[in-house]
Amino acid sequence: MADEQRAVIELDHVQKAYGDFVAVHDANFSIGNGEFFAMLGPSGCGKTTTLKMIAGFEQPTAGRVLLDGVDVSSVPPYRRNVNTVFQQYALFPHMNVFDNVAFGPRSVKKMDEARIKKDVMEMLEVVRLDKFASRKPSQLSGGQQQRVALARALVNLPSALLLDEPLAALDLKLREAMQIELKRIQREVGISFVFVTHDQGEAITMSDRIAVMSEGVVEQIGTPTDIYRAPKSLFVAGFIGSANLLPAIVESSAAGVLHVRTTDGVGIRVPTSSTTFSIGQQVCVMLRPERLQPAQAVTEAGGGLEGTLTDLVYQGATARLLVRQGDGTELSALVDATTLPTWVQPGSKLSLVWAPDCPYVLAGWPDRAGATTTNVDHVEAAL
Ligand code: ATP
């Protein structure tokens, strides 16, 4: 097995219950050497609890946690070869940057001071703070303090670095700069990073793979592109990017193509390699907004839905179109603002059309039909 495929962290059917409440159900996945892995999901879905079980701050109520192939389920945090950076990264205020980073090597390993100096300065170079070694934390910006915290957690070269919403306290601009910086640092040190976030844009920008969690369950693990293009559940489809989700019934299925009819009576042709759909089944057709184009009439090639343009919102290079269908459900399209035809005007009747490979089908019906406006155009742009 190539080294980058070697599992550094393995969760073997891990469960965490607090009394009757199960916070994490049967988490069963591995994280590879040098991988940037995000755990993504809404508040309370069990991300931090999973991270704490990897770090050793929480014990699983079932299953095992393995680090570098060794079962560490009953090993305390300080004996595990992982470090954690929290949102509140609490540097020692009375120590300068150098001493903050040297604190771990000085207290844990009995290294000689020359070696410590070399390691600390190398790590300060990685986080680009070598010129700030003698400053106190109070003399640093928020982003610089964050980088000191990273250097402190990385200086011992742990097998993995665990990060719990580490950028949440930073303002938007700094957060975006730190996303790029974190990715660069991770590449440079080559250590696995496990990153907890509820911000899908952040997860998509930085991660090699993402585990999407909901209510204690890992719904899907995959690359950002896989998860975006082929979500396995309605929850994932709506949580990553924005999606038009149209309830429909399967009418026929043959040779990799499903014919479905929406509850609004429109027939849609959906290419699928899945053989799990049956005639009469309730399904949802997902149409990503950036795959839809306005047209004056539906073409034979792909498919289309007719409606009235209720809103046209310019967002710089792109424009968001909201189209209300006959049954009142709204569809959202994200189009190139520079090539928008003049007949696309609020109040006008138009069709939204798509290429044949655009529709994607999922089992079940959503709670609410139409567009799920998670309002994250940068997600589409990042993929
Ligand atoms: P957030 O993004 O808000 O931090 P999260 O996805 O990290 O959320 P967790 O902190 O893992 O969520 O919590 C998962 C669930 O477990 C929540 O419903 C939480 O209330 C519950 N929980 C966490 N710790 C405990 C505890 N010590 N006792 C009881 N319930 C807990």
Image (cartoon, rainbow, N blue to C red):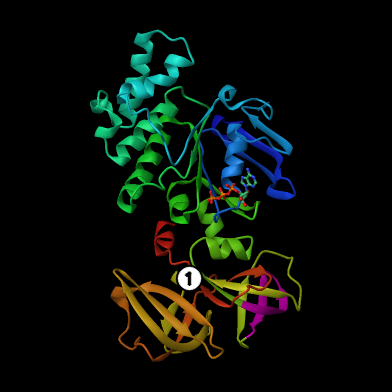
Q: Is residue 278 left or right of residue 143?
A: right
Using the image as rendered, state which of residue 362 and residue 38 is in the foreground. Answer: 38
Residue 54 image offset from top left, x and y in percent: 60, 35
How many discs appear? 1
**Dot 1: what SS?**
loop
Residue 314 image offset from top left, x and y in percent: 31, 75
- Residue at image point 28% right, 30% down: 129
In this rendering, the answer to whether 221 lies above or below 113 is below
Q: Is residue 316 left or right of residue 190?
A: left
- Residue at image point 48% right, 31% down: 191
Residue 6 visible in the picture: no
Pointer 1: what residue?
Answer: 373
Residue 296 image offset from top left, x and y in percent: 42, 89
- Residue at image point 33% right, 89% down: 343
Q: In which quadrant of the rendered view does residue 357 lie?
A: bottom right
Q: Is residue 262 left or right of residue 91?
A: right
Q: 10 Å neighbourhood of mark 1: few (<14), some, or many (≥20)? A: some
Using the image as rendered, state which of residue 167 and residue 316 is in the foreground. Answer: 167
Residue 352 image offset from top left, x and y in percent: 47, 82
In this rendering, the answer to whether 378 lies above or below 182 is below
**Quadrant the N terminus occupies:** top right
In this rendering, the answer to whether 77 lies above or below 383 is above
Using the image as rendered, state which of residue 128 and residue 271 is in the foreground. Answer: 128
What amino acid is at disc 1?
Thr
Question: Which secondary structure is most common in the magenta stretch?
Answer: strand
**Quadrant the C terminus occupies:** bottom left
Specify start and end residues of the magenta stretch as a single range. Answer: 247-263
In this rendering, the answer to whether 174 lies above or below 185 is below
Residue 263 visible in the picture: yes
